[in-house]
Image (spheres, rainbow, N blue to C red):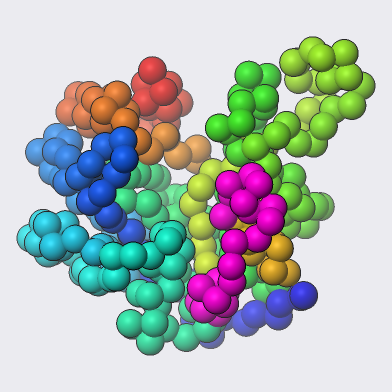
């Protein structure tokens, strides 16, 4: 299926930040204090620094709603039983009566260090890619241990930047180099790590909530494969700035607190941030 989207509003877009209180590894993390502010406020302020015309926090929790409204955020209360954050985005689009060709960027509520530049990039790329229903980003993979790590999602694209496949496996498979069982990256390698920020057209979101889990999605445990299974194209570009790791654990939270409290972000260099968060 080939999509022929045309945007009525140019590169204008809305950021939606899904924020749930429940978390198996770090309950209540959107409200965790970082340098005197709740984490969700850091995410919100970074989204405000993008070119988004509107930033909305989507939550099902009264505690998050009250805190977010306290620092002036626009909040949309959503149902508590969504199977995924993508379903929550669609509910926001429905509540606000968004048109099919409008663009929503999904910024996770546990990304207090997300660069506004990548928010702008993914929205701009989708607007410029009329055949795509969604857009996302990637970064080069240079370490063999990450290429073979199933927790690191890889992506392969065609010459125009449209995704051919996402996988937890090493793709593309370097037949001659990997045949002997050696885990080393060939000199001409083009491995790309998927960065989990998405821009969606509302039309796609409206279809997404009607689909069941696809076989390849279930096998890989990668939700984006549901889009491709149902015939939608995903545009992928190398990120202009590599976003640091999000906050999933207490260790991540401690690293981000240290970075923000010591002012280490003032240099604008994301490489030491990424290393610190991975410690």
Vertical side of 252 occupied by 110: above or below: below
- Say left or right for 197 vs 191: left
- Say left or right for 30 vs 149: left
Vertical side of 94 occupied by 38: above or below: above
- State the residue at coordinates (38%, 87%): 97
* 20 within the magenta span: no
- Say left or right for 70 vs 73: left
On the image, the x and y values in percent for residue 243 come to 45, 39
Identify the image quadrant of the N terminus. bottom right
Locate residue 2: give its quadrant.
Answer: bottom right
Q: Which residues lie in the magenta part?
A: 201-223
- State the residue at coordinates (59%, 49%): 222
- State the residue at coordinates (59%, 71%): 211
Locate residue 75: give its quadrant.
Answer: bottom left
Q: Is residue 10 visible?
A: no
On the image, the x and y values in percent for residue 206 come to 52, 78
Q: How many marks?
A: 0
On the image, the x and y values in percent for residue 174 come to 85, 27
- State the residue at coordinates (38%, 38%): 246
Q: Nearer the viewer, residue 27 or 134?
A: 27
* 219 within the magenta span: yes
On the image, the x and y values in percent for residue 194 come to 59, 42
Locate residue 229: give its quadrant.
Answer: bottom right
Q: Is residue 38 visible?
A: yes
Identify the image quadrant of the C terminus. top left
């Amino acid at each position: 299926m080939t999509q022929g989207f045309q945007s009525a509003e140019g590169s204008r877009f809305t950021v939606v930040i899904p924020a749930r209180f429940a978390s198996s590894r770090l309950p209540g993390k959107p409200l965790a204090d970082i340098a005197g502010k709740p984490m969700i406020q850091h995410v919100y302020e970074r989204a405000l620094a993008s070119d988004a015309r509107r930033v909305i926090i989507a939550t099902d929790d009264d505690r998050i709603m009250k805190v977010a409204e306290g620092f002036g955020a626009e909040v949309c209360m959503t149902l508590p039983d969504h199977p995924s954050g993508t379903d929550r985005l669609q509910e926001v689009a429905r509540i606000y009566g968004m048109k099919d060709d409008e663009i929503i960027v999904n910024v996770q509520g546990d990304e207090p260090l997300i660069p506004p530049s990548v928010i702008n990039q993914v929205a701009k790329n989708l607007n410029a890619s009329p055949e795509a229903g969604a857009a996302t980003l990637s970064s080069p993979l240079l370490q063999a241990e990450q290429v073979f790590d199933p927790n690191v999602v890889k992506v392969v694209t065609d010459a125009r930047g449209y995704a051919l496949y996402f996988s937890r496996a090493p793709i593309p498979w370097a037949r001659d180099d990997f045949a002997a069982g050696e885990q080393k990256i060939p000199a001409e390698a083009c491995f790309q790590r998927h960065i989990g920020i998405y821009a969606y057209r509302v039309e796609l979101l409206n279809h997404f909530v009607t689909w069941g889990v696809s076989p390849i999605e279930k096998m890989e445990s990668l939700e984006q494969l549901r889009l491709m299974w149902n015939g939608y194209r995903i545009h992928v570009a190398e990120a202009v700035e590599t976003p640091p790791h999000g906050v999933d654990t207490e260790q991540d939270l401690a690293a981000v607190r240290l970075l923000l409290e010591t002012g280490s972000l003032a240099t604008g260099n994301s490489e030491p941030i990424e290393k610190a968060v991975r410690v």
